[in-house]
Image (cartoon, helix red, strand yellow):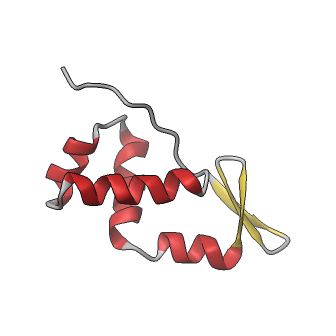
Amino acid sequence: VFYIHKGVIIINNQEIPFDEALELLSNNYRREILRLITLKDRYAFELAKLLDISQRAVTNHLTILKQAGIVNSEKKKST
């Protein structure tokens, strides 16, 4: 859930300056990652396969989203 209030966009209770939020969400892969992880928790390798990009690229996008406070992650080995 996100909304705009007084020049900031609030995503997951995290205030992000408007321009920064637009820059974060301007990337197609980041938007698709957000869409996919709102449907269910996923491993980076799953996202990579679904998006047809490298796992390293997914990890880089997740790092950017995590630094912005938009997503949380935990390291787990797949089963």
Identify the residue at horizontal 27%, vertical 60% (top origin).
57
Is the C terminus in the top left, top right, bottom left or bottom right quadrant? top left
Looking at the image, how many numbered discs can be counted on the residues?
0
Horizontal relation, residue 39 to residue 12: left or right: left
Query: Looking at this rendering, what residue extends furthest in the right direction?
Result: 6
Identify the residue at horizontal 46%, vertical 77% (top origin).
26
Looking at this view, is 5 or 66 the one in front?
A: 66
Q: Return the x and y of residue 10 as percentages of the image width and height.
A: 71, 58
Identify the residue at horizontal 69%, vertical 75% (top origin).
18
Looking at this view, is 39 or 61 the one in front?
A: 61
Q: Return the x and y of residue 65 as percentages of the image width and height.
A: 50, 56
Q: Quadrant of residue 16?
A: bottom right
Q: Is residue 26 above or below residue 39?
A: below
Q: Is residue 65 above or below residue 45?
A: below
Q: Return the x and y of residue 29 as percentages of the image width and height.
A: 33, 66
Q: Return the x and y of residue 49 as percentages of the image width and height.
A: 14, 50
Identify the residue at horizontal 34%, vertical 49% (top origin).
36
